[in-house]
């Protein structure tokens, strides 16, 4: 399949693959059935859970100034990590429970003052969208891949090459997203390791997890991509001395670019696709985690 046709095919499927949160309507606040643990706020995340199982869908809204991030919260009572990725300051946290349709009642709200240990801290730890532990299979693979590498660029190169050479775009999962079967979908990195197939959200989550696990700050980014302005997921990586890589860069005899493992993998890492990825004007960020 030619690259241009491949772009069109991928973009058409990705348009529904990234599932946006439903609007929330705050009604009267209910009883305090939510726990917000801010003990790891300095590391760039909060732990939030509903106390006990919830019979209804739950959502988390985190607001920082004019920025608003909406998330699903599992109804099992298990705590999940939500990133504090917008810097130092006051974050407002709201947890909502579905009443019907798009109407949710406010269960809990509070403000959390955040002073990060580092501005890169949120991108060095797991969260709901980049969910991993030391036992996650791709994390163990990442540590194996970088064992003999001496520089950050060598480590990034080894991990990126592994992802784009060993995983394939999952057109069936993309169709499921279009049909509405993947509402509330979150990447399962162990499942991805076994199947070796995923959509852009899976690719970007996996790459971010692998890089973070070896000490390299990495963002999972969601936004819009040319030529059809469709919703997509990709990565940005931090290189010491150079900062966040958001386009093609040249330094110390090396060349690196913004990281789009989905397109690079699907197009067999062709020169044409790398020129596209390396042109930062093709990408417009909406959210990052």
Image (cartoon, rainbow, N blue to C red):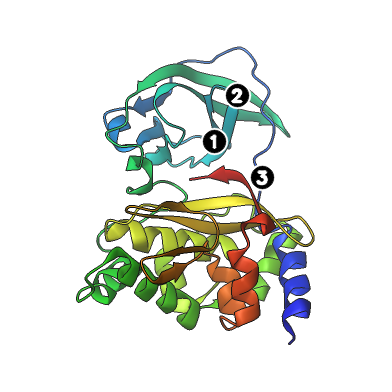
Q: Name the residue under label 3.
A: 20
Q: Which of 216 and 194 is in front in this view?
A: 216
Label whose residue precedes the other's in the sequence (2 or 3): 3
Q: In which quarter of the image is residue 255?
A: bottom left
Residue in the image at 46% along x and 70% along y: 192
**Numbered disc 3: secondary structure:** loop
Disc 1 or disc 3, which is closer to the eye? 3
Left or right: 63 in relation to 77: right
Residue 116 position by quadrant: top left
Q: In this view, does 134 lie above or below 255?
A: above
- Spot occupied by residue 170 in the image (x, y as percentages of width and height): 61, 74
Rendering quarter of residue 247:
bottom right
Question: Alpha carbon of mark 1 to alpha carbon of mark 3: how far?
Answer: 22 Å
| Mark 1: secondary structure | loop
Which residue lies at the image location 39% right of the left edge and 68% below the top edge?
Answer: 190
Residue beneath disc 2: 66
Q: Please, what secondary structure does the residue beneath circle 2 have?
A: loop
Q: Who comes first in sequence, dot 1 or dot 3?
A: 3
Q: Is residue 66 above or below residue 148?
A: above
Left or right: 209 in relation to 2: left
* Viewer-side label of 1, 2: 2
Q: How packed is label 1: few (under 14 Cα within 10 Å), some, or many (20 or more)?
A: few
State which tag comes first along the sequence, 1 or 2: 1
Quadrant, the N terminus: bottom right
Q: How far apart are marks 2 and 3 (CA)?
A: 18 Å
Which residue is farthest top? 28
Q: Residues within 10 Å of mark 2 (few under 14, many from 20)?
A: few
Q: Do the residues labelled 1 and 3 touch (CB within 8 Å)?
A: no
- Residue 55: image tag: 1
Query: In the rendered view, would you say 205 is above or below 108?
Result: below
């Amino acid at each position: 399949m030619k690259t241009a046709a491949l772009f069109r095919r991928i973009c058409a499927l990705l348009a529904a693959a990234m599932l946006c949160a439903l609007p929330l309507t705050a009604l009267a606040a209910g009883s305090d059935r939510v726990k917000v643990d801010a003990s790891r706020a300095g590391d760039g995340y909060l732990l939030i859970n509903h106390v006990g199982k919830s019979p209804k869908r739950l959502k988390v809204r985190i607001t920082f100034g004019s920025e608003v991030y909406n998330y699903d919260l599992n109804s099992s009572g298990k705590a999940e990590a939500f990133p504090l990725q917008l810097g130092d300051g006051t974050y407002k946290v709201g947890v909502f429970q579905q009443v019907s349709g798009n109407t949710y009642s406010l269960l809990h709200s509070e403000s959390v003052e955040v002073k990060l240990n580092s501005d890169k801290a949120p991108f060095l730890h797991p969260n709901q969208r980049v969910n991993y532990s030391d036992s996650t299979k791709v994390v163990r693979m990442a540590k194996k891949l970088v064992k003999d590498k001496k520089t950050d660029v060598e480590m990034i190169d080894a991990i990126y090459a592994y992802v784009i050479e060993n995983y394939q775009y999952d057109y069936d999962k993309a169709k499921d997203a279009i049909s509405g079967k993947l509402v509330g979908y979150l990447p399962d990195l162990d499942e991805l390791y076994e199947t070796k197939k995923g959509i852009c959200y899976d690719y970007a989550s996996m790459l971010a997890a692998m890089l973070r696990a070896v000490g390299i700050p990495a963002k999972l980014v969601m936004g819009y991509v040319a030529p059809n302005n469709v919703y997509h997921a990709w990565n940005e990586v931090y290189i010491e001395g150079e900062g966040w890589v958001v386009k093609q860069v040249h330094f110390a005899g090396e060349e690196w670019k913004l990281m789009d493992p989905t397109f690079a993998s699907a197009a067999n890492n062709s020169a044409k696709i790398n020129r596209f990825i390396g042109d930062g004007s093709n990408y417009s960020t909406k959210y990052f985690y």
